[in-house]
Structures are given as C-alpha cells and as structure tokens.
C-alpha cells in the first residue's frame, strides 16, 4: 500500500453528498459515496479514514451506519483495517493497470489505428536542416577529441542555461547536466537521492512514466489529488508533506501532464515553503513548458518558475515534446554540488550522451520559438476542435480547457474508463484510462485524450468514443463496483 494521507471527519463530510437524498439504505449510500471519491481520485488510495465513531458524529448518523458502510467497503476489497492504526481506502489489485506500453505490446499499430495512448508529435520541419548543420563544421571539430562529455556539450549547457535566464532564473553552465531525455533525468535523481522505502510525493493524476520510475526504485508514492480546473490544493500538499516527510516531491506545474493545468505563483510559493519545512526536495518536470497555448495577452503574467522560488530544487526539461520524441535530449537544472553528484551517478551506467544529437539540439534551441510558432497555432486549433466535438457528441462528459501541453483531461459521467478503453481497443482506438495516471488504479471516471493528431482524426475518434460509450451502458458499471475494476 502507498504511503498514506489522512482525511479528517469534517474534510471528508465536505466531499460527501447529502445521504438523505440518496436512494437505498444510508450505509450503502455512504459506502457508494466513499467508493466514488476513491475511483474519481478525489481521495487517494492509502488515505486513512476517520474512525467510525468520529465520522458518524460528523455526519449525524448512527455509529452502526458508519460501521456497516466500512464493512461494505471492506467486503468489496476497498478498505483495509489495521488494528490500532485505523481504516484505509485501497484499490483492489485488479484495478491496477500495467505500466506504459503493455497494451501496445499485445496490439501493435496498424495503418487504420487511431493512437491516442501517447501524447507526442512528429518532428518540427526544421529538424532536418538542424541535423545537416550539426553534421558539418561543429561535428568535424569535436570529432578530433575523444567524444566523452559527461556533463554534456558546454555549448548546449550554455544554451539551456540561457533559456532559464530568459525566464528570470539566474543559471550558469555548471548548473546544467544534459541527459537522454526527461525520463532519464528523473531516474538519475531517484538513483542519487532515493533509497528503498523512501516516500515520493506526486500529484494525482501524474505522469505514468514517473510513477513507474518511483516504483522501480522501491520508493512509496504519496499521491495528492489535483484539480484540472483549479490546480494544486496547496493546503493538502502541505499537510501531506508535513505528515509523511517525503524524500522528494515530483510536480508538474507548467502545463501539467495529463490535465494541462498551469499552476499560479501563489500555489507554487506555498508548496515551496511547505517543502522547505518538511525537508523535501522538489523535482519540477518542465517537459511541456514550451507548449504554451495561451493567447498573447494571457502570457504577460506567467507564473514564476519553481526554480526562482525553490533554489534547492531540481528542474527537468526536454526537447522530446516540443520538437520530437526521437530526439532524446533532456537536462537537469540544480545547484552545482547536486549536478556534480548526479554526474557521478550517471557515470556508473552511462558514460556520456550522443554528441551528434546534442549538436542537433543546440541548432534547434538557437531558434526554438520560431520553430514552435506554427506548431502551437495548429495545436490550439486541434485542442478547440476536440473539446467542441466532445461537447457536441458527449454532453455528459466534462473537460477543462488546457492552457498548454498536448492533452485534455476528460471526466466521464460514470466510472467506467477501463472497460471503455478495452472496447475501443478492438475498434482501432488506443487511449489511456485515468487509472494509468494513478499509482494504485484510481481515476476510473477519467480519460486522457491527446489533441496531437490532425483534426479529422480527432473528430473520427470522438465519433467512435460516443458510439462505444452508448453501447457500453456505463450506468451498469457504475452500479457494480467489482465489475468496473475487473472488466
């Protein structure tokens, strides 16, 4: 079980519906409401519930009602009681979805497949020109040496540092380590700072690759719910930090994956202060920071970078999302001592990065904004087309308009995302259920739908989604908790 959060009786009561207005016995209404909070991700798996007596007093129901509700949850495998410790919400093992690529491995892409399981783009038009320029004079000059650059090419480190200075964060070359993408960067940080059993705080939902990396290092995830519309709950994050004292906090404040949220400065500042009090190091993933789909007027008051608010933290960046997934160039920004420590950790398994790819990245960074301009305009149109089509065909679904990134986080009107994705797979649509973005299989009411494909393909995909949803009879899945986690 993941490291736990605790929810008090008053806070839990605020999340629950009026039990008097629910059909059936009160205990069943309470059990169903708690199940919905877990599956929707409003309470994370591993959350410690109030005692039956305290919850009954807060809700003004009999203790027998609260006890029967907890018994009902336990019989469905959604509550773990520990003598002397309390009662914890959990997801049955059958609800936990396999890691990235599991579905792709058993159902390879065909020409007719619409792949919405990965939020990625084809290469920018300038990639070939950048590769040509990089292969000329710069490569010839560097080829005269041994080719090992454990921190990365100095010229590329300078270029990345300059991007941070443009955002108002004083950064030197010595504070940059070039990596083989953002995933490699996070793995290095975990390798250097985390021991088995350590806790790592994440948002809920969060990037599946990061959740898998945390698990691979035998660390425990502390998941704090995030709202696509309102961003971080700074109070909940602060409480989780102080209660569990995680070693790291992995956060995506800039066009969050998968919700596309942009976290305001005030929430960032509060979270940085709480992390300092708990002794937690913050790792900020900025992989999507350049995919800013806001209007020019909205960009005037952009949030402060986390690196400006938390000098002791780590910032991760990459060219994989804005430029091309095949260009495996990423970086870490941290203080000089941490960069040296990470370089030592890297040398144990990876002596240096590919020189030619770094030269290509350098050429692209010199004119990155010009390369991205047309791409951002097209993505904005595709995002709006996707949301409009979802509203037209599936009016019961809800999606906040993402400020940036490559995907929309869509709330269904019943918790049946996993059975829906299974049916869609047989109809040529690959898509990720919300449970992929949770450490314990929650978020069954959500789908991540990327808008990286051309508009006609998105329209076609939504038509299949709508038809399949109608045939699925999601209300039947919502009535039977066990069916929706084993379908």
Image (spheres, rainbow, N blue to C red):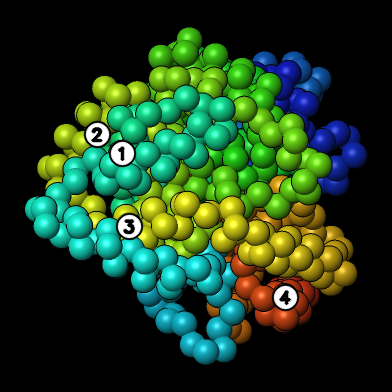
For marks 1 and 4 on the same chain, the one whose residue lies earlier in the sequence? 1
Identify the element where label 4 is drawn.
helix
Asked if residue 1 lies left or right of residue 169, the reply is left
Label for residue 342? 2
Real-space Cα separation, disc 3 to disc 1, in angstroms: 15 Å
Labels 1, 4: front one: 1
Real-space Cα separation, disc 2 to disc 1, in angstroms: 8 Å
Real-space Cα separation, disc 2 to disc 4, in angstroms: 42 Å
Labels 2, 3: front one: 3
Report the residue at 49% width, 20% height from top: 310
Report the residue at 52% width, 54% height from top: 367
Q: Is residue 52 visible?
A: no
Q: Residues within 10 Å of mark 4 (few under 14, many from 20)?
A: some
Residue at mark 3: 359
208 over 31 or under it: above or below? below
Q: Is residue 459 visible?
A: yes
Contact, mark 1 vs mark 4 (Cβ under 8 Å): no
- Residue 230 falls in which quadrant of the image? top right
Residue at mark 1: 177
Residue at mark 4: 455
288 over 226 or under it: above or below? below
Contact, mark 2 vs mark 1 (Cβ under 8 Å): yes
174 over 435 or under it: above or below? above
């Amino acid at each position: 079980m993941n490291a736990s959060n605790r929810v008090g009786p008053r806070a839990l009561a605020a999340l629950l519906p009026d039990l008097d207005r629910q059909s059936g016995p009160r205990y069943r209404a309470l059990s169903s409401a708690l199940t919905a909070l877990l599956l929707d991700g409003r309470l994370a798996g591993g959350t410690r519930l109030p005692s039956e007596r305290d919850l009954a007093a807060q809700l003004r129901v009999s203790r027998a009602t609260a006890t029967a509700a907890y018994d009902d949850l336990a019989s469905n495998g959604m509550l773990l009681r520990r003598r002397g410790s309390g009662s914890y919400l959990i997801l049955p093992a059958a609800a936990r979805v396999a890691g990235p690529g599991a579905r792709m491995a058993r159902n390879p892409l065909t020409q007719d497949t619409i792949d919405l399981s990965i939020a990625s783009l084809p290469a920018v038009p300038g990639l070939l020109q950048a590769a040509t320029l990089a292969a000329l004079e710069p490569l010839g000059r560097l080829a005269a040496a041994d080719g090992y650059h454990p921190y990365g090419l100095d010229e590329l480190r300078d270029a990345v540092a300059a991007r941070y200075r443009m955002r108002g964060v004083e950064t030197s070359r010595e504070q940059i380590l070039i990596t083989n993408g953002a995933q490699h960067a996070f793995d290095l940080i975990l390798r250097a700072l985390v021991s088995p059993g350590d806790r790592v705080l994440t948002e809920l939902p969060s990037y599946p690759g990061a959740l898998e990396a945390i698990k691979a290092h035998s660390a425990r995830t502390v998941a704090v719910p995030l709202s696509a519309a309102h961003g971080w709950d700074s109070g909940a994050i602060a409480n989780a930090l102080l209660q569990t004292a995680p070693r790291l906090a992995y956060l995506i404040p800039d066009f969050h994956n998968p919700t596309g949220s942009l976290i305001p400065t005030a929430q960032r500042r509060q979270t940085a202060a709480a992390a300092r009090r708990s002794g937690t190091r913050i790792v900020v993933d900025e992989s999507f920071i350049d995919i800013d789909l806001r209007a020019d007027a909205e960009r005037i008051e952009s949030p402060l970078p986390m690196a400006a608010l938390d000098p002791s933290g780590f910032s991760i960046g990459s060219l994989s999302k804005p430029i091309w997934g095949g260009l495996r160039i990423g970086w870490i920004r941290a203080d000089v001592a941490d960069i040296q420590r990470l370089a030592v950790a890297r040398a144990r398994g990876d002596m240096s990065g590919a020189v030619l790819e770094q030269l290509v990245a350098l050429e692209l960074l010199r004119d990155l904004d010009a390369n991205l301009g047309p791409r951002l305009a097209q993505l904005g149109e595709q995002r709006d087309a996707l949301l409009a089509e979802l509203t037209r065909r599936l009016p019961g679904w809800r999606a906040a308009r993402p400020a940036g990134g490559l995907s929309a986080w869509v709330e269904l009107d019943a918790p049946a995302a996993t059975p829906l994705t299974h049916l869609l797979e047989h109809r040529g649509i690959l898509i990720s259920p919300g449970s992929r973005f949770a450490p314990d299989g929650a978020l069954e009411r959500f789908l991540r739908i990327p808008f990286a494909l051309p508009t006609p393909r998105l329209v076609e995909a939504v038509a299949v989604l709508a038809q399949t949803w109608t045939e699925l009879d999601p209300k039947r899945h919502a009535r039977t908790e066990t069916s929706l986690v084993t379908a």
